[in-house]
Amino acid sequence: MLGLAWSFTGSPISAPKHESTVSGNPALCIKMVTPVIRTVDLRSDTVTKPTESMRSAMANAEVDDDVLGSDPTAVLLEREVAEIAGKEAAMFVPSGTMGNLISVLVHCDERGSEVILGDDSHIHIYENGGVSSLGGVHPRTVKNEEDGTMEISSIEAAMRSPKGDLHYPVTKLICLENTQANCGGKCLPIEYIDKVGELAKKHGLKLHIDGARIFNASVALGVPVKRIVQAADSVSICLSKGIGAPVGSVIVGSKSFITKARWLRKTLGGGMRQIGVLCAAALVALRDNVAKLDDDHKKAKILAEGLNRIERLRVNVAAVETNIIYVDLPKDPKFGAEDACKSLEVLGVLVIPQTTFRIRIVLHHQISDSDLEYALSCFEKLFSSVPEEKV
């Protein structure tokens, strides 16, 4: 990616032939002049590149056929993640979406079953409706509060019993997300998860945790993963988000749960052969990168504080608990989040529009202090160039 240093003006300009003008908004005209080789990729923590240690481990991985259950590196990874999560067994899957889908389908093994989950959850919003389209499972949403939780009383009120009205599907599962991405990477309190687990048991339901960034929660809370997910019957743990492996997730649960999950993985086309090359990189990520998450969180807080000092931007700094930042822009219909993201991209700063006037930023271990300073300077230049009366 070629970043470009800009000069800023508040009104349209005529650029000489050797220069070009970016004008998605008449209120903001940006003249590109001097090329600068720099990219700061803050779109997600999934954009990290494999480290040299990972590449070496992948090249030298001991492998066999995992569909036949004999890839030794896959077995090693699964045992290690199961131990970390305090569960009996584990299984590697190509993606977190598949991991969540398999988990829901194992627990909701009759078509027409119901899962209770947050209205702002990843499973509900970003996983193509797979639980319903592929599994015939009905999603029953409960409002996610700002802290990522759902009210316990609302969860209980949403449940439908097999002894209840014939008009309703039967609730079999509750899903939580930790950290909760759309709520800003919030960590669910352990006491809360325990209460949801108790509620599930009281009503004969299962509890699944989408723990895509569970290591972020563990580091932020200062609590082992196994304690956080103690009440859960199953957990999906991403190896790419947070800890920076190139591919894959691991789902954990009881031995019987994983036995059923292996059948579903094969059905969904997720059975792969010599996956040791992928699992080797994940083992390096577990060894090297979990300890780096605290730095990611600190950098996120520093960047959030800096962005919040820019007059026209708003960041709830207190809400930044892990590595995700949401930046609220002025509600200018002529210059929204998509415009801002395109303008920042020209500078080499890559971010994602979350809503019409909100930008998402995600920190990861390959963002340096210098990258942080550069990204902040680009935001300052961009938003100081927008005429105040237009904002």
Image (cartoon, rainbow, N blue to C red):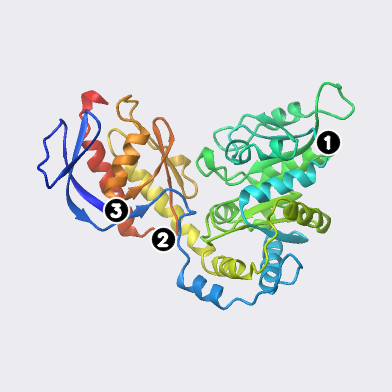
Instruction: Give me the C-alpha separation between circle 3 and circle 2.
Output: 14 Å
Q: Which residue is mark 3?
A: 373
How many numbered dots are placed on residues in this image? Answer: 3
Q: Which of the two discs, 3 and 2, labels the residue nearer the N terminus? A: 2
Residue depicted at x 37% and y 35%: 338
In-image side of 364 versus 219 (left or right): left
Whether residue 222 is situated above or below residue 389 in the rendered picture: below
Q: Residues within 10 Å of mark 1 (few under 14, many from 20)?
A: some
Residue 360: image tag: none
Classify mark 2: residues with Cα within 10 Å, few (<14), some (14-19) or many (20+): some
When the figure is inspected, residue 352 is found, relative to residue 146, above or below; the finding is: below
* Residue in the image at 81% along x and 39% along y: 205
On the picture, is 167 further left or further right than 20? right
- Is residue 192 visible in the rendered image? The answer is no
Instruction: Point out the image quarter for the C terminus.
Output: top left
Residue that extends furthest to the right in the rendered view of this protein:
163
The circle on residue 203 is 1
Q: Write down the residue under mark 2.
A: 366
Q: What's under tag 3, amino acid-wise?
A: Glu
Image spot of residue 199 (x, y percent): 78, 37
Amino acid of disc 1: His
Q: Secondary structure at mark 1?
A: loop
Along the line of sight, which residue is nearer the eye, 283 or 63? 63
**What residue is at 84 percent from the left and 39 percent from the top?**
204
Q: Which is nearer the eye, 58 or 355?
A: 58
Query: Which type of secondary structure does the marked residue at label 3 adopt?
Result: helix
Circle 2 SS class: loop
Side of 212 where 363 appears, left or right: left
- Marks 3 and 1 sit apart, C-alpha to C-alpha, by 51 Å
Q: Is residue 92 visible?
A: yes
Amino acid at the residue labelled 2: Gln
Kindly check if marks 3 and 1 are in contact, taking CB atoms under 8 A apart as contact. Answer: no
